[in-house]
Image (spheres, coloured by chain):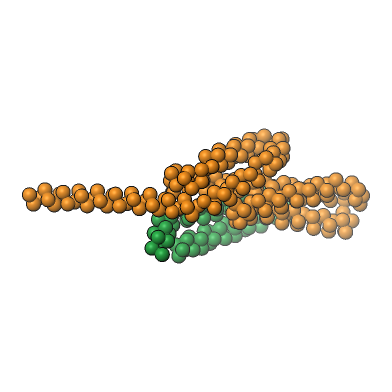
Amino acid sequence: VAFEEFKDTLAAIAEEWNAAERDIKLGEQVNRKVVFPAIKELRYAGRRLADAMVVIVNGGTDEQIHDLLVDARFNCHCARHDVIDAATLKMAIDLDLMLEKLGHEAALFAFPKFPDLYKNIQDAQALIAAAREKRENRQEIYAEIEATKFGDLVDMFNGLKASEPLMKRIATKTKSQRYIAYALAGSSIVLSLILWTFS
Amino acid sequence: VFGNLIDRYLHSGYELAKEIATMDIVARFSRGNTAAQNGHLLDDPEIDAMRRKNAKAMKRLAKVSKQRAHVA
């Protein structure tokens, strides 16, 4: 087996693996669970590398080794893509849930950069959608997201998470006031009906 | 204490919705991973078995998260 032939592929795998681990560390800051699919992909990559070593030791063909190494590299790509997709989707859903369940006022008051973060996440999602459509440019698009957006998005999202307790407190106050107003309005109507009946 | 209780009551739906969203995302991307193997290592019955096992695990995880959110 001519190992020189696989030198570039092995170097590319190491590079991809490092990039995937960097992305996974960022993704973990968003949510520890959403990185599971990416970690699985790295596990598959490790399995392919182990298979390649077995083929090398048993004197397999260059083609067999090449195929397994290419598979391993592909799995590293998938890990990078999975963690970016999953973490971005998680951020987008969490933001929507904050607006829906806690309210716009609470979100804006507790985290004034909320609209900027919302827009940046939408931009990242638009890029991801474009990457899915343009298979030939997929790698470049994800590299761009990694280089320009992903780290900043995670930083901003961490700031948002730090503001979440305040957001909840404001939402509680707003909801409590609303419930008290409903209760007062309901009581007034009932009281008016009682008075009207007995007058 | 009273404030925290009110918070928990009012926002239990919010926390549960976030947990369910996380589970959905993990399930969505994990399912695709079996396809990445392209049948090279696992044959079809094995992939089916893996998929069934994953689906079962995800249901169990969702149930546990729901119970945890309820207790919290």
Task: Return the residue nearer the eye: A16 or A157.
Answer: A157
> In the image, residue B62 lies at what x, y percent?
52, 59
Task: Return the residue nearer the eye: A134 or A179.
Answer: A179
Task: Return the residue nearer the eye: B53 or A174.
Answer: A174
From what the image shows, is residue B37 above or below residue A139? below
Color of chain B here?
green
Q: Residue at x 52, y 39 (%)?
A: A115
From what the image shows, is residue A36 above or below residue A88? below
In the rendered view, does B31 fall on the left or right side of A63? left
Color of chain A here?
orange
Return the residue found at the far left.
A199
> In the image, residue B2 lies at what x, y percent?
38, 63
Q: Please tell me how many numbered marks the rendered image carries.
A: 0
Task: Return the residue nearer the eye: A164 or A146.
Answer: A164
| Residue A164 seen in render | yes
Q: Residue at x 54, y 42 (%)?
A: A113
